[in-house]
Image (cartoon, grey):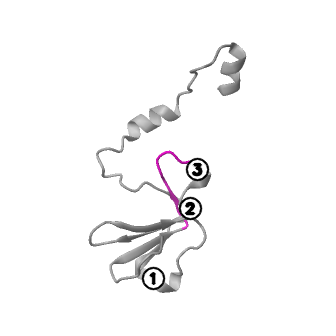
Amino acid sequence: MTPTSSENVHLVYNARIYQSGSEDDDDMTWMTFDEVSGVITAVGRQDPTPSLERFPPDRRRDADGRRIIPGLHDSHVHLAYLGSQLRTVDLKGCRSIEEVLYIG
């Protein structure tokens, strides 16, 4: 996506932006959003990161590699369920102790 640089659009870069169903190494690394509407206007991976010069210092933020979870306000993001899922192992289809040990 190509970000716009209107006076209401901000850039967050050097981030690990969570996406449901993706692996950590597949995270988006930058996003732009409109501060008035709260809408994410563009997202992307390392390259091409939008030119920092297009965003004045007060409209860009280096996330320093921190995790961002867009839509956290959405009532359909169930972090407790996600946390419990990350602590479980799916053993469906395992037919032996060896398969359980391999998966676990």
Circles 1, 3 touching at the beta carbon (< 8 Å): no
Q: Nearer the viewer, residue 91 or 82?
A: 91
Residue 30 among those drawn in magenta: no
User: Going 56% across and 27% down the picture, which residue do you hit?
Assistant: 89
Residue 65 image label = 2
Q: CA distance from mark 2 to mark 3?
A: 12 Å
N-terminal of the pair, mark 2 or mark 1, is 1
N-terminal of the pair, mark 2 or mark 3, is 3
User: Quarter-wise, where is residue 32 in the image?
Assistant: bottom left
Q: Nearer the viewer, mark 2 or mark 1?
A: 1
Label 1 sits on residue: 55
* Dot 3: element: helix
Residue 24 image label = 3
- Magenta part of the chain: 14-22
Give the x, y percent position of residue 43: 47, 66
**Three-letter amino acid code at the position of disc 1:** Phe
